[in-house]
Amino acid sequence: MKWLSDEALDRLRAAADAPDLSGTGYVLIDKLGSGGMSGVFRVTDTALGREVALKVLGIEDSSGQLGARLLREAKIIAQLEHPGIVPVHDVGTLPDGRVFYTMKLVQGLRLDQQREELGGLPERLRTLQKICEAVSFAHARHVLHRDLKPQNVMVGPFGEVLVMDWGLAKLLDPGVLAEEKMVPKIAESGRTLPGQDASDTQSPEADTAHGVVLGTPGYMAPEQARGEIEAVGPRADIYSLGAVLKFLIEETQGTPKALAAIAGKAMAEDVQQRYGSVEELAHDIAHYLDGAPVSAYPEGAMTRMWRWMVKNSAWLLLILAYLVMRALLILWRAR
């Protein structure tokens, strides 16, 4: 009996895992990764001659519910046209009936892989600001992410920051999808995509029982970790952003108290003690970068005086130099 090498086995597994793209207008290049119930592949869009990422279910879906979820994810992302959110290009079904969608192929590394390359604290905080901008935009469109973490943020070679993986997104307003303009395509087999009826606009929790935990430990809010679905709102994403901030500053030398206070407020156990919006959190980060007081860290008189002196150090040095020169001139004349 001839045994197959590990390399040969890997090739066989990859071939078995590869989606059948016949009739879709896409040509498979390689697999980018997998997670949960789906896989992501690098493919060529033959119509436009460009490489894109294709996401498809990686497990059997006899009920069609998983396909409907993937389609719903694509529709949600399609509503979020923002530079910090990966755009969806197309949606369809494979010959075997599995749902797929294609999106921009993101170049770069995940935030958890890129943290050390970001440089000092200011650059890390500016990266967090970009994440906040994308999440704030989503909230304005009535969409919660619910799985914000460094692994779901990509940092590109030119400093671009993209929030990824909206598979656990929650719609605060189910009408968002009801009003969307994307028309699902019909597969070659003649079968329509799953989820094309009124159930497509229902709440994402319609088939999720109370008490089921959705999210990532360490980054999801306490109410989310307890499975309190109805209690999960924008401040749950704010908690996750605080956890991302904590991740970004945890290895810096001597974390400033103001930054620790910002993270602490964002991650407060009590929902009402957190920032009221992502914009409030982003403003505190901006104030810190500008050397201004932050709302999360009340300052005493001495601290305010020191901050004023640091902010006006250039003028103070000029005044001090003038006084020293006057003193020396007076002493010289007195001789």
Image (cartoon, rainbow, N blue to C red):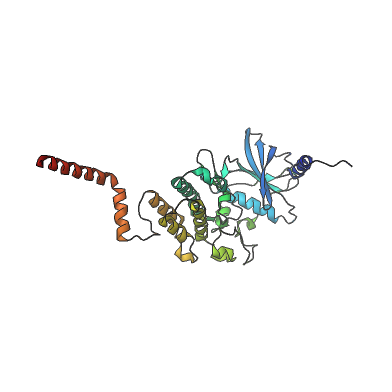
Q: Residue at 14% x, 40% y: name it.
A: 329
Q: Would residue 194 appear left or right of 114 to someone viewing this image?
A: right
Q: Looking at this rendering, what residue extends furthest in the left direction? A: 334
**Quadrant where the image shows the C terminus:** top left
**Figure disc tally:** 0
- Is 258 or 157 nearer to us in this picture? 258
Picture coordinates of residue 25, whole percent (x, y)? 69, 37
Picture coordinates of residue 260, whole percent (x, y)? 44, 57
> Above or below — where is 41 with respect to 36?
above
Q: Residue at 32% x, 57% y: name it.
A: 303
> Above or below — where is 236 with respect to 320?
below
Picture coordinates of residue 157, whole percent (x, y)? 53, 38
Q: Would residue 160 appear left or right of 27 to someone viewing this image?
A: left
Rendered image quadrant of residue 155: top right
Rendered image quadrant of residue 199: bottom right
Q: Residue at 41% x, 54% y: name it.
A: 284
Residue 187 visible here? yes
**Quadrant where the image shows the N terminus:** top right
